[in-house]
Amino acid sequence: TPCNLTRYNKELSMVKIPSKTSAKYLEKKFNKSEKYISENILVLDIFFEALNYETIEQKKAYEVAALLGDIGGQMGLFIGASILTILELFDYMYEV
């Protein structure tokens, strides 16, 4: 599959020269009859329908380093709590 894909959609619409004023203007400009202008003159507009783009990226949900860091943090919390509990038990036994 290609890394970059560009797809252009086309939309076609046609209309006769919309007003008598523009037909008369073109008649004077090209020195042709109004009938000739309506049958042979073309106005071509090319434009972008939308000026935005979409980027799709895939990322790992959970990195290995983050997983190890979280496991280490939990272990430190539990070991610290266990040591505090043992020290509290020694303190209680010493006072009794």
Image (cartoon, rainbow, N blue to C red):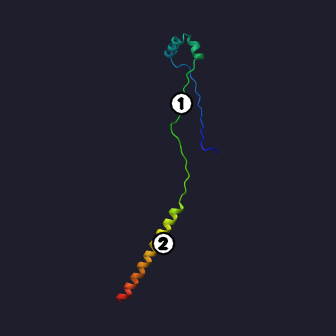
Where is residue 53 shown, x and y percent of the image? 53, 41
Query: Crowding at label 2, few (<14), some or many (≥20) Cα neighbours within 10 Å?
Result: few
Where is residue 25 shown, x and y percent of the image? 50, 14
Query: Crowding at label 1, few (<14), some or many (≥20) Cα neighbours within 10 Å?
Result: few
Sequence-first tag of 1 and 2: 1
Q: Measuring 51% from the left and 39% from the top, which residue is drawn there?
A: 52
Residue 47: give its label. 1
Give the residue number, with chain letter if any, for mark 2: 75
Q: Is residue 10 above or below residue 25?
A: below
Q: Measuring 53% from the left and 60% from the top, which residue is drawn there?
A: 63
Q: Measuring 54% from the left and 54% from the top, which residue is drawn there?
A: 59
Q: Nearer the viewer, residue 11 or 94?
A: 94
Q: Measuring 41% from the left and 78% from the top, which residue is drawn there?
A: 84
Amino acid tagged 2: Met
Q: For the C terminus, which image quadrant? A: bottom left
Where is residue 67 shown, x and y percent of the image? 52, 64
Instruction: State the SS at label 1.
Output: loop
Where is residue 94 shown, x and y percent of the image? 36, 88
Residue lying farthest bottom? 96
Instruction: State the SS at label 2.
Output: helix
